[in-house]
Amino acid sequence: MQGGTAPAETTKADFTLQIAPVALELAPNRIISTIGYNGTCPGPLLRMKEGVPVTVDVINQTETPEFVHWHGLFVPAEVDGAEEEGTPPVPPNGRRRYQFVPKPAGTRWYHSHAMAEADLHKGTYTGQFGFLMIDAGKDPGRYDQEVFLALRDWEPFFSTQEMDEDEQEDQGAKPEKPAVLDTRPNGLEVTSVMYSINDKVLGAGEPIRAKQGDRVLMHLLNASAIENKRIALPGHRFQVLALDGNPVPTPQLTEAVTLGAGERVDAIVEMNQPGNWILGATDDNVRNAGLGVVVEYANQHREPQWMPPAKPGWDYAIFGRAAPGATPEQKIDMVFEKIPSGAGKFNVWLVNGKPYPHEEFVLKQGSRYRLVFHNRTDDSHPLHLHRHSFEIAEHRGKPTAGIIKDTVIVPLFGRTAVDFTADQPGLTLFHCHIQQHMDYGFKALFRYA
Ligand SMILES: [Cu+2]
């Protein structure tokens, strides 16, 4: 079935999303104004069945056109929720019906895809995001409790801050580092000093309550518009089962989890360390400013404890398999650069020498492609391909296979290669999931010949 967007009809939709201002109580006496779905941030958890058509009515009670993007779904361009692909907007004070067939199964999410540019109260800076679970009807494994944890920052502002702590610590190889660095002064970056998991700052919400021996299935999402995040739970490890909702070939236990903006991780945590703990950002400033939630065992009353993880590294390749994947027929090199714009102005981001819009990348239906991402910038970028998933072929200099994702962090001055099959005809947007980078040039369109 083809999807489509149309003005709402008289039949009842399966889901209704109402876009409207929300007063979000992050903590007592810390109430912020944002825009959300159905009066909450995150919006409602949407559960859909793989392959069963759905209708979603979106009612826009704001003064600006909106787009709802179904992140990680294989849906036609007309309903994908990207203006660049030709999806019609949900008009200001108007409504639109989205109809599509949800697939593939797994942890997906939905969020605004409006441009924000200099307006930090638009697009993914707002509370317009939520989990979307597509159920395959298969048993997802044995667990006692399922929790949905969206990592967020709030009240963003412009600064000239160069890069975050994690990036300064990046010890990886830098094959794309230019011999001569661009030393022009940096332009404005977006930053935040207020964080939450779901709608509460650390300590302000209900804890995750567990008993010794419980297996807690955590669905983690980085819903930030601004930066990649890393979290840990002292005394516990994450058994990572899926990346971006897709089961990994080699589940692994990790002490910390890194999530680029837009990425998801599904992990089981075995509760075998009685006490009260902070599940939170490994960056002290970010955690102390709210990015965390208390994990409380039954009958434990001491103050929640934090300890930094011993080995904070994150490497996708450990979840892959060694055997090479199918060899792609075509290779597309994508080179990313930043033009520093100086104080008070916005940096410009280039894909193959030009900011968006540029010539489209043309795909032949049925062909398998290798995209080689050359990151010649001093930031790590979470890169997202719409309407398709890809398989990581090489990351941090290591070949791998079997890791299927829709968003991948390309390390600063690093290189990552992904393979995908061109099997979803229609315009396809590619972009960095950091809103400001996307808005100022870091995107591209693929079209089918
Ligand atoms: Cu970026």
Image (cartoon, rainbow, N blue to C red):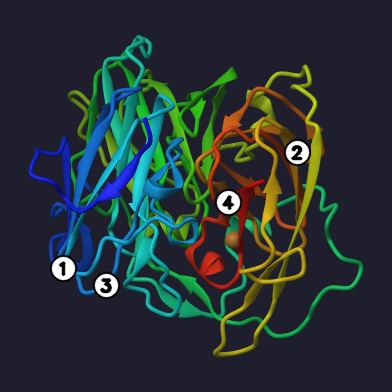
- Specify which label sits upstream in the sequence, 2 or 3: 3
Residue carrying label 3: 64
Q: Secondary structure at mark 4?
A: strand
Residue 336 lies, in percent from the top left, at 72, 62
Residue 45 visible, this angle: no
Residue 342 lies, in percent from the top left, at 64, 88
- Mark 4 vs mark 2, foreground winner is 2
Residue 411 visible, this angle: yes
Discs 2, 1 touching: Cβ within 8 Å: no
Does ligand 1 reach within 8 Å of label 4's beta carbon? yes
Residue carrying label 1: 93
Classify 10 Å Cα crowding around label 1: few (below 14), some (14-19), many (20 and above).
some
> Within the image, what quadrant is residue 3 found in?
top left
User: Ligand 1 appears in which quadrant?
Assistant: bottom right
Q: Tag 2: residue type?
A: Arg
Q: Secondary structure at mark 3?
A: loop
Discs 4, 3 touching: Cβ within 8 Å: no
Mark 2–mark 3 distance (CA, rounded to whole Å)? 38 Å
Classify 10 Å Cα crowding around label 2: few (below 14), some (14-19), many (20 and above).
many
Discs 4, 2 touching: Cβ within 8 Å: no
- Specify which label sits upstream in the sequence, 3 or 1: 3
The tag on residue 370 is 2
Residue 236 lies left or right of residue 197; in this view the side is right
Considering every residue shown, the one lying at the far front of the view is: 449
Residue found 62% across the figure and 69% down from its top: 356
Q: Secondary structure at mark 2?
A: strand
Residue 437 lies left or right of residue 226; in this view the side is right
